Amino acid sequence: MAKEAETGSSGSADTVEQKILKALRSGDYTVTNMAPKNITERTAPDGRTFYVIDPWGDSDCGCEIKVAGYTFTGWVSEEGGAWECDDGDVNLDDDLCDALDEIDQGGIHSVPERDRFVRFYELAHGCSCDEVYSTEGDEVPLDVEETDEMFGGIENVVAQSVAVIGAGRKKISENAYCRNAVLEHVDIAKGVEWIGDGAFYGCQNLKSVAIPSSVKRIGASAFGECPNLAVVSFGEGLESISNRAFDGCRALSEVKLPSTVTAIGGAAFRDCTSLIRFSFPGQIKTISHAVLCDCKALLRVDIHEGVTDIERAAFYGCSKLKEIAIPHGVRRIGIGAFRGCVGLTSVTIPKGAKVERDAFDADVAITRR
């Protein structure tokens, strides 16, 4: 019935949609409940804006337009806003929706930008978080844990420069605070066992981090490219530091790792250009590739007995390193391991150790014992 054409004064047939458009454009309509309902604007730790819908209330923003005998209601959707009509036969085409949008000043379409809309259930209300959408246009919903970490705790999404992070959780999720521009000092909460990959990657203003003894693993690039990170305290109990975990932390001048560390990944401290001294914990067996590559201020490295392999480019470009004690148990020194260590003039290595191509600069005097 809604699709039947109606004859206008000119004798031409108007569709229902055309009739509604004419009424909208002539101002022959009423609008009620313009104020958005149950929507809260919040700021995530990285500075992005998100819009939260209270799951216990209606999801419409309260915009109701009555025109030509029809009622149009504005509803929030994952795309940012949608219209519904009390007569399902009305075709909500682009022209009609655009006309409704023009009237809806302060309503559904003006709340979020369509490509930056986020919908999620508030964890504080105990809801399951099965509909979460990121502002980057991801179509795959995030899981509950990622959501809580991404927003810094739903009740505290406006991050402070000093923050305790991860309370009540065993893991800080991947990329949870990636490129956060606010954080300066972070205390990881006791009870956290795992700092996920990229959790604090690119936090330009981060200056200090306190890691408790409960943390067993620091993920790949967890603190990578944090150029102002100068102080990191590690609790006894840490077991592994993954690849590139502190890569590019150029203000980091001192690292004191606990004795419990058994593995340090490749490039974990690469390009830490202020690092002066580094001591490998006694349980380390392999010095990973590029682990201290381009640490140009490095003066001293302590390698304990028990290390068997020094992998490729491990100390490449450590130009101020003048001496290195390589323990008896080392069986292999990888390609370019000490290449570019221009301050290193001589080195003593175990008699049976395999020295791979370009492990040292050509002018380094090698003595075997």
Image (cartoon, rainbow, N blue to C red):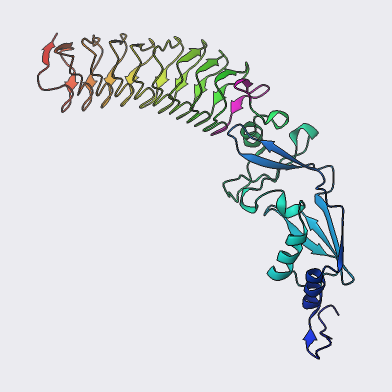
Q: Which residue is drawn at 45% across and 30% down?
A: 221
State left or right for residue 121 relative to residue 160.
Answer: right
Image position of 369 (left or right of 23): left
Residue at the (23%, 10%) spot, across then down:
324
Whether residue 163 is in magenta: the answer is yes
- The furthest residue to the front: 26
Q: Can residue 341 be seen in this view?
A: yes
Above-or-below relation of 109 to 229? below
The span shown in magenta is 160-176
The outermost residue toward the bottom is: 11
Asked if residue 334 is positioned above or below residue 366 in the image, the reply reads below
Q: Quadrant of the C terminus?
A: top left
Q: Quadrant of residue 24?
A: bottom right
- Dominant secondary structure, magenta: loop
Report the front residue among 105 and 230: 105
> Which residue shows up at 43% across the image and 10% down it?
256
The spot of residue 43 in percent (x, y) is 66, 35
Q: On screen, 368 above or below 105?
A: above
Q: Where is residue 347 in the image (x, y as percent from the top left)?
A: 16, 12
Q: In which quarter of the image is the N terminus?
A: bottom right
Query: Residue 231: within the magenta?
Result: no
| Image spot of residue 83 (x, y percent) | 77, 61
As drawn, is 241 to the left or to the right of 353? right
Nearest to the observer: residue 256 or residue 8: 8
Residue 190 falls in image quadrant: top right
Q: Which of 68 and 253 is in front in this view?
A: 68
Is residue 93 visible from the viewing direction of this image? no
